[in-house]
Image (cartoon, coloured by chain):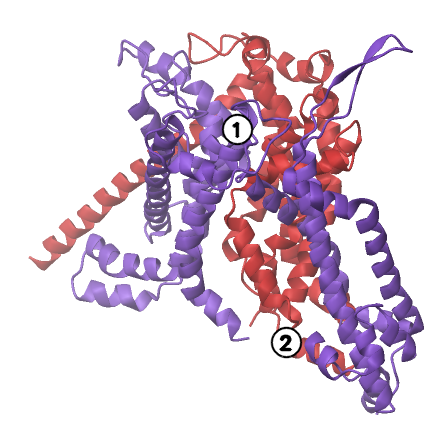
Amino acid sequence: MKGERLKSAKAARVRNNILIHILLAVLAFIWVFPVLWVIMTSFRAEKGSYISTFFPHAFTLANYTKLFTDTTILNFPRMFMNTLIIAIFSCIMTTFFQLSASFCLSRMRFKMRKPFMNMAMILGLFPGFMSMVAVYFILKAVGLTEGNLIRFALVLCYSGSAALGFQIAKGFFDTTPFAIDEAATLDGCTKWQIFTKITLPLSKPIIIYTVLTSFIGPWVDFIFAKVICRANADQYTVAIGLWRMLEKEYIDNWYTSFAAGAVLISIPIAILFLNLQKFYVNGTSGAVKG
Amino acid sequence: MTTTTKELQRQARIGTREMIRAKSCLAALRSGGPETKASALVMGLGNMVHKQVPKGLLFLAAEIAYIVFMITNGFHNLAMLVSLGSIEQQEVWNEELQVYLYTKGDQSVLLLLYGVATILLTAVMFWIWRGTLKSAYSAELTDKAGRHVATLGEDLASLLDENLYRLLMTPSMFFIIVLNILPLVFMICMAFTSYSKIDDHLVLFDWVGLKNFATLFDSGSVLGSTFWSVLGWTLIWAFFATFTNYFFGMILAIIINRKDTKAKGFWRFCFVISCAVPMFVSLLIMRTMLQPEGAVNVLLRNLGLIKDSLPFFTNATWARVTVIVINIWVGVPYTLLQLTGVLQNIPNDLYEAADLDGANKVQQFFKITLPYMLYVTTPYLISTFTGNVNNFNVIYLLSGGAPVTNLASTAGSTDLLVTWLYKLTIDKQYYNIGSVVGILTFIILAAGSLLTYRNSKSYKEEGGF
């Protein structure tokens, strides 16, 4: 009697498990499908976005070569270089601003500390690009919206207010024991030495996190780039380029190349992201364990 | 032994630098000596009298620079801020060159920008002025007590130590003021002007007070009725976008992390890989896939499931449901990553006790998991809600606000306040109305979240440091 009940309970569990795994498989398919679709489209030989069949008839690499050779209308290699330069500089600036602000807010006590944190919160509630038009006017008034200076303007846009995004790094610094700082002060360290010689070496995960997220930013933003670049096609970043490929006049010729470009910029970001996952989960866990 | 020497050295170092600090600039004005009081007019005088000549000269230089700026530009900027300019650009026939020349007219936008910038500069200057008073008073107190007054070199050295925050935060603050605060104040000012394509006020415009707010709140006008419908949809969207993601992500995380689920890493990878593709790329792809002739419709038609293409972005209700569903696709992987850790923190003995009491999984979810999660993740939910009210990307890239059902209005059925704001400013050039929308969005968000944030556990605990 008892054995039978256990058996039926076990059967129910097996049935549940099978159902759940099927459900997961279906969901996983839904989530992976668009990704597969892009990869497939990037190798598709037929042009255009409107297709009558689901699977491509023939595969080709031409979409990729077109991206790098056909530079008359949409100069992809140039956009790539623009974005790379912007990404490198804004990454350096953002990392410095964000980490130093986080350090000050976490390790030092000064009168403007709370006001600064409240200000960051209030500024964060305004719609981000409400001020974008104004930023454009300001950059124009200083003469940063012409020629190559646009890149500099974009770097400023991406990293200028990086200090407002101090929360994650500050949360991380907060978990480093203050006793370490006190010991260092007794040994004659200045605050600057504590920052560079103690806090930073203990905070590798959060440095990597900051560097990578700020590096990815310019690759995936296109609203700011569009407003700042306006009609200066030679300053376009990859994101605007990809966006333009889907405009009505280009979509027929460029749709498959759009997919190719999307795959190209997704690969590095995907690799970074998969490695970053764990910071997403334990982004706020501490530097010094147990 | 070495420690004691070091400690002695440190005390010697700090001792030389320790000055008597003035409490406030008011104290300086009230009880400072004549030279300190005079520093209110001649900045840096107090410092120069009390052995801080270079520092005093720096303050004086700042004051002179400010005065020169105000005389050459500043007062003019402030004066023009009142009227915002009135001279129109005119054609004048030039007899000598035999051509029409254009006279330089006023450009109200620039006048407004320069005016606001001058006011901000004055505010910064006021802050420096307070600093000089305090500095002069501290120098006076220290000198009178017969103690060592810090030299410029020592002051600079302190920037790397106890004043490190000044060194590190000043450049940041500079950029925040120039790239965040100044534009924001500038845009807020626009809400009170007639800067708009309506009635052709793009070059010259005036202050109009609260007129734009009145227009937007007047539900009889086109803009007014659009505002209320957009606001309604924004709140519906933010609610559904937040909670569908939250619950779906939570259930998914629970299913993946169950004891009996095999290949946990693989399933997680499947979901996470989709957010490794940049969001704007996946949204653009979704958009092309859901077009009347896009992949989804083609697939369904070829399978014989439907005859006509589904109106994903052409029917208002379909479009609204579509954006919410696609937002689930976009957002759930992030939610999954963020909630997994929190879920694993729920004490396991709660579940064991529930098992013993014969509670099934569904009961456990509603009686244990959900209350715990809601309690712990309230701040997260608030920030997600705020983020969704301001969620520009999903709507703009996916539907672009389409479909437009009412041709007279400037917003489509799926437009949020932010995308409508974008359309109003960038496409329509109704800058004044756009900034009113921005201000109202802010007020709605601030009213709700500021209170909740300040009451949240993490904010309060941080204060305990």
Image side of residue A225 versus residue B312, left or right: right
- Nearer the observer, A184 or B407: B407
Chain letter for mark 1, please. B
Colour red, chain: A
Report the amino acid beneath label 2. Answer: Phe
Res. B336 visible in picture: no
Report the amino acid beneath label 1. Answer: Tyr
Q: Residue furthest left?
A: A1
B36, above or below A286, in the image = below
SS label for mark 2: helix
Task: State which mark lies toward you, 2 or 1.
Answer: 1
Residue at coordinates 37% horizontally, 44% vertically from top-left?
Answer: B242
Residue at coordinates 37% horizontally, 32% vertically from top-left?
Answer: B224
Which corner quadrant of the image does residue A108 belong to? bottom right
- Residue B391: x %, y % from top left: 46, 38
Res. B309 visible in picture: yes
Image side of residue B5 versus residue B413, left or right: right
- Residue B265: x %, y % from top left: 45, 46
B404, above or below B415, in the image = above
Residue designated by label 1: B430
Colour purple, chain: B
Residue at coordinates 41% horizontally, 44% vertically from top-left?
Answer: B263
Query: Number of callouts in the render?
Result: 2
Alpha-carbon neighbours of circle 1 within 10 Å: few (<14), some, or many (≥20)? many
SS label for mark 1: loop
Image side of residue A112 versus residue B61, left or right: left
